[in-house]
Amino acid sequence: MEGEVLVDVRNIKKYFGPIKAVDDISFQVRRGEIFGFMGPNGAGKSTAMKIITCFLEQDSGAVRVAGHDTLTESLAVRQKIGYLPESAPAYGEMTVTGFLEFVADARAIADKAAAIDRVVDMTGLENVRYQTVETLSKGFKRRVGLAQALIHDPEVLILDEPTDGLDPNQKALVQDLINRIARNKAIILSTHILDEVERVCNRALIISKGQILVDSTPQELIARADNHNVIKLELAEGDKALAKRIEDQNWCERVIRQTETQWEIVAKDRENHLGEVMDLLEGVAVTSIAVQEGRLEELFREITEGVCA
Amino acid sequence: MSRYTGLSAIFKREFKAYFATPLGYIFLVIFLMASGWLTVARDFGQFLELRQASLVSFFSYLPHIFVVLVPAVAMRLWAEERKTGTVELLFTLPVTLQGSYLGKFLAGWAFLGVALALTFPVVIWVSVLGSPDWGTIVTGYFGSFLLAGAFLSIGMLFSALTKNQVVSFILSVAASVFLLSLGLPQVLEAIGSIAGVGGYLEQLFSALSLIDHFQSLMRGLLELRTVAFFVVLIGGWLGCGMMLLNQLKAS
């Protein structure tokens, strides 16, 4: 995963009047990375994306995309980036093909027809090619936005909430598409759907109030969740001595006895200790046993709540 | 890549957009009906009563039509982009501010050119009825085209100012009426009667007046200062509009 750095964000700050929208953010995205940008609404995700795509100018700091500075070589940067703005705006009165033709024109693509055919095929727009954009459903509109962002086969793809407001099937389609095109690109996508980060991204960044709180992988994040690898145990009948025996293990933090027979075993190191527990349970009648996976959602709440409060 | 990158792509899109919605056709129909009616109406152009093979009756009332209709052509140019959010799409494409602003302006101007060209029956009419002075017809059309461009550059600034097309329309009509009225004889007279500085003001206002410059073209007078006046006027409004848009595009 050591591709070259395609997006290099250094200490950018952006104020809207007295409000700090982005407060000293730095990160790098390499080729091959799918970078999940998470944070509550108003955290500064969109603003940061608008700065990288040259729609806004930062007040201080620098952004380089594929080696070009966003302030001094803005056109070169925009050539390298494919961008899907939030809620995928498009010219409603144009047909899908007409709209894509315009984008291809503006991007000075030599073989327009081939480029359009490629993205229409990729995003499954075949059946609506000649429909005007305003007559399309939300899901199709989003796909038109994606097609537009992919038309020049960009090295850097920036997607602002690509699945927001879509139904589960449409979400899965868009996520599949992102996974398919991810090779050889650097992708930044913002979302507040945490499952999506787990499913699609190989790096995750949580920001809140314009600051980076966590820069990690989704797997590491999950491992940090308090409820990660908690063993849920249900016994046929209560057994206080057994609980004591488990609690006496040096890896065990505590046994939470929710009822006489339903327990949760929390490990100090958040590792999976199912094997050790099974050994202790020899000869005990067990109704069910399961190891819990940490939920990104809970961690997200833990991390952002302190800041937002 | 130059300062005007994106101009031609945006010009094409915008020009087509006028014909993709009913707005363009409605505009053409209203413009042609209004200009035709004002030309022959007994209270206005008196084309038939004058019994002259001249298009003065036609050109004289074009400024009044433009004042209302050109803002309708201009109002959507930026207001709609900002309202629907496509402005974000546009300015993250590799296009410059100048390229996109001029591309839109030229598309609107070309559309107004089409509207003017469609008034050709009135030219045929005078040439059948008598032998008109072709020079004044050519300069008259040229002047009308310049005037349309001037109102368009004004309307575009107000379109960049607000996300609301109706507000943009009203503001640009008001500004256009104001600029147009500066050159009306009644206004000039009133200004001239101000004690002391009146004479200078009258001269200044008449030099800045759209009507004055338009009328000299209508009478067949093609002077450099007239063309320069329109070029500076249009350039000034376009330049201010660009600066304004650059400040407001993201808000």
Image (cartoon, rainbow, N blue to C red):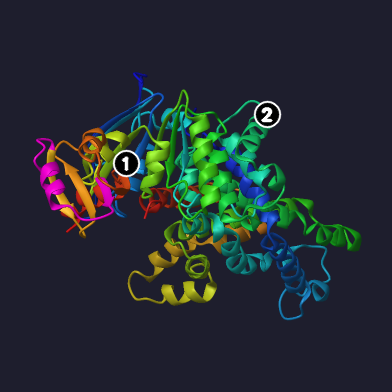
Q: Which residues are magenta?
A: A231-251
> Are labels 1 and 2 assigned to the same chain?
yes
- In the rendered image, is residue A232 in sight? yes
A202 vs A11, left or right, is right
The amino acid beneath tag 1 is Glu
Q: Which mark is residue A114?
A: 2
The percent position of residue A97, horizontal first and vertical second, equals: 67, 42
Within 10 Å of disc 1 (Cα), the crowding (few <14, some 14-19, many 20+) is: many
Q: Which residue is mark 1?
A: A57
What is the quadrant of the C terminus of chain A in the image? bottom left
Within 10 Å of disc 2 (Cα), the crowding (few <14, some 14-19, many 20+) is: few
The percent position of residue B32, horizontal first and vertical second, equals: 75, 65
The amino acid beneath tag 2 is Ala
Q: Earlier in the sequence, mark 1 or mark 2?
A: 1
Determine whether A30 is above or below B218 in the image. above
Q: Which mark is residue A175?
A: none
The percent position of residue A119, horizontal first and vertical second, equals: 61, 35
The percent position of residue B193, horizontal first and vertical second, equals: 41, 77
Q: Please report, as a chain letter, where disc 2 is located.
A: A
Residue B176 lies within the magenta run: no
Q: Nearer the viewer, residue A164 or A226?
A: A226
Q: Residue visible at 49% across and 27% down?
A: B1
